[in-house]
Amino acid sequence: MKVHIREVAPRDGFQSWPDFIPTDRKIEIIRMMIEAGITEMETTSFVSPRAIPQMRDASEVMAGVPRNVCIHSPLVPNLKGAQLALDSGADKLVVVISTTDAHNLANVRRTVEESLIDLKAIFELARERKKPVMGAMAVAFGCPYQGDVTDDQVYRLADAYISGGAASVILADTTGMATPPRIVKLLEGFTKRFPTIPYSLHLHNNRGTAMANLYAALEAGARTFDSALGGIGGCPNVPLAAGNLPTEDVVFMLEDMGYDTGVDLMKLIAAARHLESILGKTLPGQVMKSGPRDPKLAAAVCGITH
């Protein structure tokens, strides 16, 4: 059975890094991940350079990445970002709005209603350019300022995306507040209410529950997941945010469970280790340290000789 991986390290991961990562290094990592079999990624983000300086080279990154082998889906917070992304050759747009006013104000300085007003123009532009839009719902499982988020808050935002013409949506556990029962409850309600809309799960590991949440989501029928090479990432407006699920850890577990990800684990591990050398800091990923199940391959990853 196929499970689709959406790689978010070039956007969610890099945006959280304090020191600017040279553009050619970003493109290098993106190329390695595509060579490993990644077929869709959030390649960058077209946001204000003042807000997130790491993303100031978004157009240059888009100009340097391989085409026609991977869907490049930059994140855009507003109409201006959408225009820049499409002019840079985006294959798909990812629009993000929080489910709560408190987080949306911290994230983009707008209420949810104010963000929704801008949404119509983004959808119209995307239709003109014949590009799909993916609607991301941040803090869908809990808000760092409000606390619990109701299912109705999630449904309301999903309704706005879907009625506007979104091709798919993302249910994001931006805060890592989800637990398996909460995952199952929301997915059961969401798929009952929106049975035909494709969705992805975006799981952060702030509280150490992300992999358990992924397993619970699998059992509940989810088949598309966001993950980040090396486990880097974290929302700038979530206090002490931890990273995403490491892509190589996710691929290791899914493949061993019998799911087909279409990703070459050894090439992915090589990309994660190379990213670690570029960033100069130990990354959260575990499989990049211990290697795959095969002892010989694991020894090769760890540099062990027998």
Image: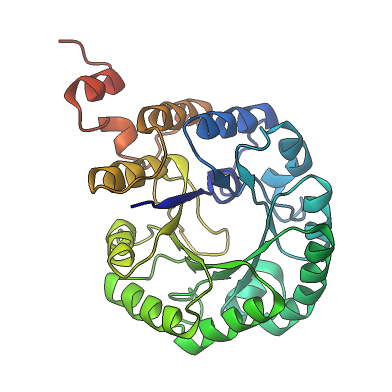
Instruction: Say if 159 sits above or below 206 in the image.
Output: below
Residue 181 picture location, percent across and down: 28, 76
Residue at 38%, 65% in the rendered image = 222
| Left or right, residue 146 beside residue 45 | left
Camera-side residue: 217 or 234?
217
Q: Quadrant of the C terminus?
A: top left
| Left or right, residue 220 beside residue 242 | left
Camera-side residue: 136 or 52?
136
Residue 213 picture location, percent across and down: 31, 64
Residue at 30%, 56% in the rendered image = 211
Camera-side residue: 211 or 266?
266
Residue at 50%, 72% in the rendered image = 139
Q: Residue furthest top?
A: 306
Instruction: Say if 51 sits above or below 13 in the image.
Output: below
| Left or right, residue 156 beside residue 241 | right
Residue 151 quadrant = bottom left
